[in-house]
Amino acid sequence: MVVGYRSRASCGEARIEHVFCPRDSVRDRMPQGSLWIHGMEPKKVRVPFHYKSMGGHPLVGGTTGAGKTRTYEVVSTQVIHNRKDVLIIVDPKNDDEWKKRVERECARAGRKFLYFNQAKPHESIRLNPLENWSQPSKIPSRIAQLMEEGPFRDFAFLFIDRAVKGELYVGDKPNLRSILKYA
């Protein structure tokens, strides 16, 4: 993978660049910051980078506008176009440009794009936290974890546990609505 570009790229490099850096992507954005502070060169050069070299827990650091999210855009694009890997993004800032880039790259690669955001249920997929469980006690544990520790959480755990066991006893499958109904 190549971040940035050279004016004289070979045919193979140009094709790779077109796949991983389409128009209005990282390479077309103006550099930000002062060259002498941030160590940025006035001319663009090749910087080889592949996400598989980021074993373990990578950290991309920098000040506002330094290109952290754009770096993750490039990494995301590499992962999407490698059919063997799965990409899961946890973005507390909800960067809309990053989301749109990942969505576009999934469409280009013919891969499924799923988006989960509790604040935007009309755009989000739905997750059922009670769909899969191995023991009935897993259900009240999952729900009670959302509450602050203390006596109310302990009471909620006991109540939910009894409601779940009651539903299972009569042959029903517990879900959030049925637990709420019994509350």
Image: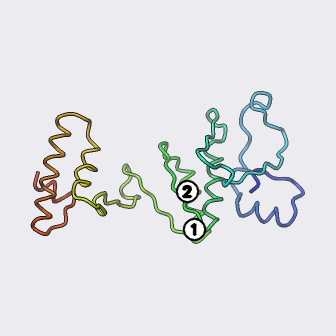
Residue tagged by mark 2? Answer: 100
Q: Is residue 136 left or right of residue 42?
A: left
Helix or strand or loop: what does disc 2 sit on?
Answer: helix
Amino acid carrying label 2: it is Lys
The answer to whether the residue labelled 2 contacts the one labelled 1, judged by CB atoms less than 8 Å apart, is no
Q: Which residue is mark 1?
A: 107
* Residue 93 x/y as whole percent: 49, 42
User: Measuring 13% from the left and 62% from the top, which residue is drawn there?
Assistant: 167
Residue type indicated by callout 1: Ala
Dot 2 alpha-carbon crowd within 10 angstroms: few under 14, some 14 to 19, many 20 or more: few
Which quarter of the figure has residue 10? bottom right
Which residue lies at the image location 63% right of the left edge and 49% below the top edge?
55
Q: Secondary structure at mark 1?
A: helix
Q: Residue furthest front?
A: 135
Dividing the picture into quarters, in which one does residue 78 lie? Answer: bottom right
Image-based side of 103 in relation to 19, left or right: left
Q: What residue is shown at x 15% (from left), y 54% (from top)?
A: 180
Quick one: quadrant of the N terminus? bottom right
Give the CA distance from mark 2 to mark 1: 11 Å
Mark 1 crowd level (few <14, some 14–19, many ≥20, 10 Å Cα): few
Q: Which mark is residue 181?
A: none
Counting residues from the start of the chain, the first of labels 2 and 1 encountered is 2
Query: Where residue 95 sits: x, y (%)?
Result: 53, 47
User: Is residue 131 rendered to the left or right of residue 93?
Assistant: left
Colour scheme of the rendered structure: rainbow
Q: Residue furthest top?
A: 37
Q: Residue at x 25, y 35 (%)?
A: 149
Please count the marks in the image: 2
Name the spot of residue 135 as percent of width and height, x first: 25, 59
